[in-house]
Image (spheres, coloured by chain):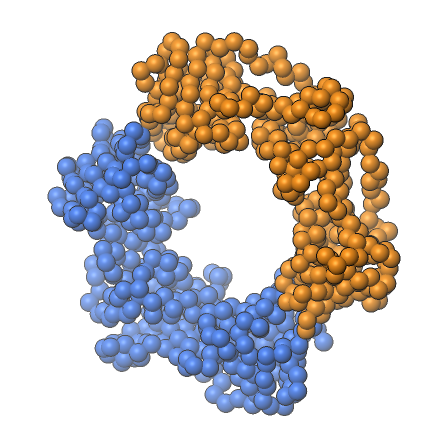
Chain colours: A orange, B blue
């Protein structure tokens, strides 16, 4: 293996591919990036077995790629990223010089790194599922951001650690929940499809960091999902198990409605966030048509009270308490300047939406408080 | 206690005072800031017993300070900093409302925080030592930066965890060493003094972050040192024990000299820094008048070689190895565009200086290498 490539393009592609790599992989080979040089292209692969990312670089002018000899090797990701990032040269040469010893050189610097054999690298099936649809990158990213934060970080119910994608005809519903809060987003597809899969949040978060604004092709079957754009292929495993039926949890009629400036409420929740009970900041809304007050209390720390001057409320007097972090996250990811809370009682789940966008909904369960 | 103060000034002063506070203080009161309101001024104190910082705020226009009632309380530093930082108001009111319960309010937000009694706060003797001199803040900061990084972080020889300040007549010598490297800085004072004290690095580092460019008065006796500027008083304990005689360690005559562009060498060392043996990146200089080469090697990772094109060398062929991190730090804190290495043999300590500034010197011990 011997090739020459633009430092900038090589580094960018290595950075993307390395996103799949976990720091603590049980398999040594998975801490490396597999580099394969073919006659007219280079394939870079990174994986932790849950998520795999593959990039194909053609010998075109953009990459200044010249392949002088084919071959393959696996190089520890952190070493090759560090070398390529710091090398002070426009192009870089990579050459296997002895067995697995790989020379990486540019300008006056030269590194000889002990590689691993590609035979130690598990084979990954990158076959593309037959059913696929296309989404704008920006739309996909927004959908991920608005739902994945609400998933569970506990492995007790694995299915809740992912976002459920359920498609019926042209309507795609994405739901994330940790059973205390729920985020739901609807997207209309340009074709009719039927699938119901749950994608690990970790995979989605990596994907949201990689995708650009251009279109992403999403290919899905009951084993895996692939995201394809440019020269990048991201593949993730699915989470086994039946995703709970969530639609019946969402109330349909409401007796109270609070409208408030998002930033004002985020700031107020942030100010009170240091007042914690057992590590949780519980906030209480005391609402009536004259005045809306946010308060929190902890025997150990003290208390806070704040009048929400930008709030307007419709309905009878209501006192409702919930996890402040949940409301903060929900509003942050809704990403609208004005938000609307709809309540149906002090111990019933309530929903938060923006004024202009019905496609996304956040639901939060209240908590019982001390007083 | 009841006062009103500019949010900005109060926050800035709380931030400075809180720098003395350790996260893990054995004494609960030391996790707080002591606030004392007198008739015409406010005193804020933070301490971890090693370093103590006190700020005096007068009732003048700059602070918009109005004291309505005298009194004192200790408030958990992280709570009061968080509240004052996030409060959305130009001024803030602080009032003891019930025993130790302290109300902090601004705009529409109000916090009631459980304070601690000042009786629980250890009394700190802030008496000013009689001997003192004055240094420009910038000069003091540079001196600290250029010496404190070389001190030891191990408690086996406590005296090496501080910087030694030895003054004979008008010459102040500052030395930091961990016994593998040494940094020495000379400063000429405007008056004649005699003292020999060792100041903990941690205190010096906090001081370097607080001081501005204006003059700092430094008052010293054999128990403590005080740094005074503006309305701030920083006091630190000294480290007990005789500081080793270091001047005889510094070679006086040299057989080899390497001159090199600082940035080029820093970049080259940085590029090789991932090649480690037992966590240490050892670099080898292979120097002769034709070519200067930097290399490093690890059985596990691999090797690197780099020609130092900006280097010029005088003397016979020399191969010398040392800890790359030590050379990197020394050059970084010397802060000159061109540095000069003076060697007297492959197993003898060598020194690094900038071309223009004789007042500062870095000394490094070489290491024996594998090959």
Q: Is residue B260 left or right of residue A77?
A: left
Q: Position of residue B62 (x, y in %)?
A: 20, 49
Can you tell which quarter of the image residue B93 is in?
A: top left
Q: Quadrant of residue A223?
A: top right
Is residue A259 shown left or right of residue B280? left
Residue placed most toward the observer, A59 or A273: A59
Q: Is residue A262 above or below residue A366?
A: below
**What residue appears at the point 66 percent right and 83 percent down from the top-left corner?**
B291
In the orientation shown, which residue stands out farthest toward the left?
A: B39
Front one among A312 and A350: A312
Residue name at image x 70 percent, y 53 percent: A14
All told, the count of numbered labels is 0
Quadrant of the drawing holding the C terminus of chain A? top left
Residue A55: image location, x then y, percent: 76, 48
Relative to residue A146, is residue A231 drawn left or right? right
Residue A170 in sight here: yes
Residue at 56% x, 90% y: name it: B255
Q: Using the image, determine if residue A369 lies above or below residue B267.
A: above
Residue B164 on image: x %, y %: 38, 70
Q: State the quadrant of the N terminus of chain A.
A: bottom right
Q: Is A26 or B12 nearer to us in this picture?
A: B12
Q: Position of residue B287 (x, y in %)?
A: 64, 83
Judge whether B194 appears above or below B14 on screen: below
Q: Is residue A50 visible?
A: no
The residue depicted at 30 percent of the width and 78 percent of the height is: B188
């Amino acid at each position: 293996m011997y090739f020459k490539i633009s430092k900038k393009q090589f580094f960018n592609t290595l950075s993307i591919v390395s996103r799949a790599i976990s720091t603590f992989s049980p398999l040594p080979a998975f801490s490396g990036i597999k580099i394969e040089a073919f006659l007219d292209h280079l394939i870079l692969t990174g994986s932790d077995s849950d998520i795999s990312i593959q990039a194909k670089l053609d010998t075109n002018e953009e990459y200044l790629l010249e392949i002088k000899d084919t071959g393959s090797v696996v190089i520890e990701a952190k070493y090759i990223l560090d070398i390529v990032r710091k090398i002070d040269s426009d192009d870089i040469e990579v050459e296997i010089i002895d067995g697995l010893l790989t020379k990486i050189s540019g300008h006056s610097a030269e590194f000889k790194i002990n590689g691993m054999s590609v035979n130690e690298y598990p084979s990954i099936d990158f076959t593309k599922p037959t059913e696929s649809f296309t989404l704008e990158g920006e739309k996909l990213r927004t959908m991920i951001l608005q739902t994945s934060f609400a998933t569970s970080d506990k492995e007790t119910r694995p299915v809740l650690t992912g976002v459920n994608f359920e498609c019926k005809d042209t309507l795609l519903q994405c739901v994330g929940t940790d059973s205390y809060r729920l985020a739901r987003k609807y997207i209309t597809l340009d074709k009719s499809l039927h699938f119901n899969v749950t994608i690990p949040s970790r995979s989605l978060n990596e994907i949201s960091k990689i995708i650009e604004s251009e279109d992403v092709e999403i290919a899905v079957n009951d084993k895996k999902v692939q995201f394809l754009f440019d020269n990048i292929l991201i593949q993730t495993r699915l989470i086994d198990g039946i995703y709970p039926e969530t639609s019946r949890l969402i109330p349909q009629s409401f007796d109270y409605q609070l409208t408030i400036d998002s930033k004002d409420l985020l700031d107020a929740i942030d100010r009170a966030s240091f007042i914690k009970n057992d590590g949780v900041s519980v906030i209480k809304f005391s609402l009536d048509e004259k005045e809306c007050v946010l308060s929190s209390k902890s025997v150990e720390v003290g208390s806070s009270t704040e009048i929400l001057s930008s709030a307007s409320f419709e309905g009878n007097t209501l006192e409702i308490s919930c996890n402040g972090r949940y409301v903060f996250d929900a509003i942050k990811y809704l990403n609208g300047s004005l938000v609307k809370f709809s309540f149906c009682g002090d111990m019933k789940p309530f929903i938060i939406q923006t004024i202009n966008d019905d496609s996304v909904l956040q639901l939060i369960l209240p908590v019982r408080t001390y007083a």
